Amino acid sequence: MSLWAIISCQGELARDERIVIDKCINRDGKSAPPVAIQACTELLDRNVLQGHERFYLFVNRALAYVARGDRQHALDDYNTAVKVAPKKAQPYYYRGVFYTAQNDGAAALRDFDTALSIDPKLVAALRQRAITYLLQKNFSGALADFSEALRLQPKAAALWSERGHVCLLQRDYESAVKDEAEAIRLDPKLARAYFLRGAAFGDLGNSPSAISDIVTAVDLDPSLDHYVSTKDKTASIALPPF
């Protein structure tokens, strides 16, 4: 349940309070970090939420601090969120994402492990742990987490494409083609899936299919052209970052 839903369930909101909540959660995506920080602080001072639900406010304020580049205050708020709601998976998940961004893989994995011990079906935590494993070159761990995430959300095209990316990194090109094909079936406009399938086709020696997929990928997302280079009439590609 979102912060907005939690607060809405507590009764009719006054107009000014709704405005402050919208700014705290950056509902329209237009709240500058200082505005969001001020709004979340105001809600905390007003004790709008009680008990463990207060973690939503600390997490939202931490996100605003991150956007402002204030990592220490962000971490302070993430730590407080965990203390406020130690039996909730989400605070650990958000702090884990923060640690991943700070290249602290060990701390990130501890938080993702805790989040998943509380809620084994938290797909976002499975996905982020898989990405953290990849940064540590733990391909088997990443593959296992993406597979579990797909078991829980089999219609998530991005997850199929991400698992295909792992297969590609492991040089399991046939599995990569299959996963990217499923991603494309679910989302025919997913440019990265065409690009990664094209790379897999290329490694399998299927040049016509590789070229077709790469062209389609670049048509859908011109920024992917950055990963294609041509020298002496020979084309080569680099994999985009995960």
Image (cartoon, grey):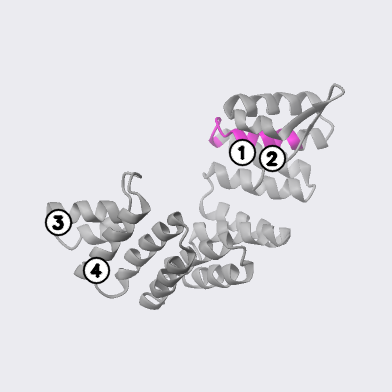
Mark 1 vs 2: CB contact within 8 A: yes
> Which residue lies at the image location 71% right of the left edge and 43% below the top edge?
176
Closer to the chain start, of discs 2 and 4, is 4
2 vs 3, front mark = 3
Closer to the chain start, of discs 2 and 3, is 3
Closer to the chain start, of discs 4 and 3, is 3
Q: Check disc 4 and give the amino acid type.
A: Leu
Where is residue 135? Give x, y as percent: 68, 58
Residue indicated by mark 4: 49
Residue indicated by mark 1: 182
Q: Main secondary structure of the magenta part?
A: helix
Which element carries disc 1, helix, strand or loop? helix
> Which residue lies at the image location 74% right of the left edge and 25% below the top edge?
211
Tell me the CA gap for discs 1 and 4.
43 Å
Tell me the CA gap for discs 1 and 2.
6 Å
* Residue 90 in the figure: left or right of residue 180: left
Tell me the CA gap for discs 4 and 3.
13 Å
Q: Say if the magenta span includes residue 180.
A: no
Q: Check disc 3 and give the amino acid type.
A: Leu
Please report the bounds of the magenta region as a residue range. Answer: 186-199
Q: Residues within 10 Å of mark 1 (few under 14, many from 20)?
A: many
Q: Check disc 1 and give the amino acid type.
A: Glu
Query: Which of the labelled discs sits on residue 13, or is there none?
Result: 3
Which image quadrant is residue 28 in? Answer: top left
Residue indicated by mark 2: 178
> Which residue lies at the image location 25% right of the left edge and 56% below the top edge?
21
Numbered marks: total: 4
* Residue 240 in the figure: left or right of residue 37: right
Q: Residues within 10 Å of mark 3 (few under 14, many from 20)?
A: few
